[in-house]
Each structure stands twice: as C-alpha cells, then as structure tokens.
Amino acid sequence: MEISFPGNQKVNASLNGFEIRTDQPAEGGGEGSAPAPFDLFLASLGTCAGIYAISFFQNRRLNAEGFKMTLDFSWNEEKHLLDKISFTLTLPKDFPEKYIPALKKSVELCTVKRTLAEPPEFETRTTKQSPA
C-alpha cells in the first residue's frame, strides 16, 4: 500500500488498483471532500462484519430481504479512543431463531474485528530519498 499527499489535509492510499481518498472535515482543517481516515476505519469494521453476515445468509439460502446491520460506538473523551463498539443485527421477520447464535458468531469472525482483539506489532521506519 502506498500513501500519497495530494494537498491540504487530503491523504490517499493506493492498494490493488484502488485509490482510497480521505480528507479531514472543514473544522479539522480539511475540505470535507472525502471520509476522514477514522470514518473509513469504522466502515472497514462494519463492512467486514457485513461480509460475514451476508455470507451466512447466502450459504444457508436464507432470505436476507430486510436484513440490516448498524454499528454504534462509545467514545472516551479523555483518551480520545473508542471504548465500546456494538453491532446491531435487525433480522428479517422470518429469520429462524435457531440460527441467531450462529449468525452472531459469524459476525464475530470478521478479520478486522479479530485484528483489533489481537493487535499486531506496529513499527515506524524512516528512509531518505536517494540523491538525484
């Protein structure tokens, strides 16, 4: 993944042929032209869990019409960090009760969530450009 700096508070990431754009909101010095990186972090968590959830429906040939998932979180102002993230699964009215525990477990298998539960080691290195 390569990170680029197109101007002001915009920071983009290039990965697998995709350009992921970010910007800070106007009150943070940006232009609000794209989601902030933290918003993408939350979206990554939600969409990852969503892939596991919709795959659960598809693998069992269950009707997913009306299925909805929301992500809520509480923010610790003192630490400036999240202290709780909650997924709410709104199930179709005909969803079989017997599958509820398995669906919840499936959502818990999201790789982004599991990475947060067992954080990797972080390293920051520096290098200088070669002389021209």
Image (cartoon, helix red, strand yellow):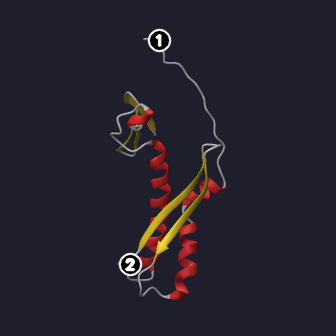
For label 2, the SS is loop
| Quarter residue 47 falls in | bottom left
Q: Which residue is mark 1?
A: 131
Q: Are marks 2 and 1 in contact (CB under 8 Å)?
A: no
For label 2, the crowd category at 10 Å Cα-Cα, with few meaning under 14, some 14 to 19 and many 20 or more, is some
Image position of 12 (left or right of 110):
left
Residue 131 on image: x %, y %: 47, 11
Q: CA distance from mark 2 to mark 1?
A: 58 Å
For label 1, the SS is loop
Q: State the residue in front, 3 or 35.
A: 35
Q: Earlier in the sequence, mark 2 or mark 1?
A: 2
Residue 4 on image: x %, y %: 41, 31
Q: Residue at coordinates 46% horizontally, 43% vertically from top-left?
A: 37
Residue found at the far left of this picture: 33
Q: State the residue in front, 88 or 60.
A: 88
Q: Which residue is mark 2?
A: 64
Residue 95 on image: x %, y %: 45, 85
- Of circles 2 and 1, which is in front? 2
Q: Residue at coordinates 53% horizontally, 76% vertically from top-left?
A: 103
Quadrant position of the C terminus in the picture? top left
Q: Residue at coordinates 46% horizontally, 65% vertically from top-left?
A: 70
Q: Is residue 16 above or below residue 43?
A: above
Image mark for residue 89: none
Residue 113 on image: x %, y %: 57, 58
Q: Amino acid at mark 1?
A: Pro
Q: Is residue 132 above or below residue 59?
A: above
| Quarter residue 7 falls in | top left
Q: Amino acid at mark 2?
A: Ala
For label 1, the crowd category at 10 Å Cα-Cα, with few meaning under 14, some 14 to 19 and many 20 or more, is few
Q: Residue at coordinates 52% horizontally, 87% vertically from top-left?
A: 97
Q: Is residue 62 above or below residue 33?
A: below
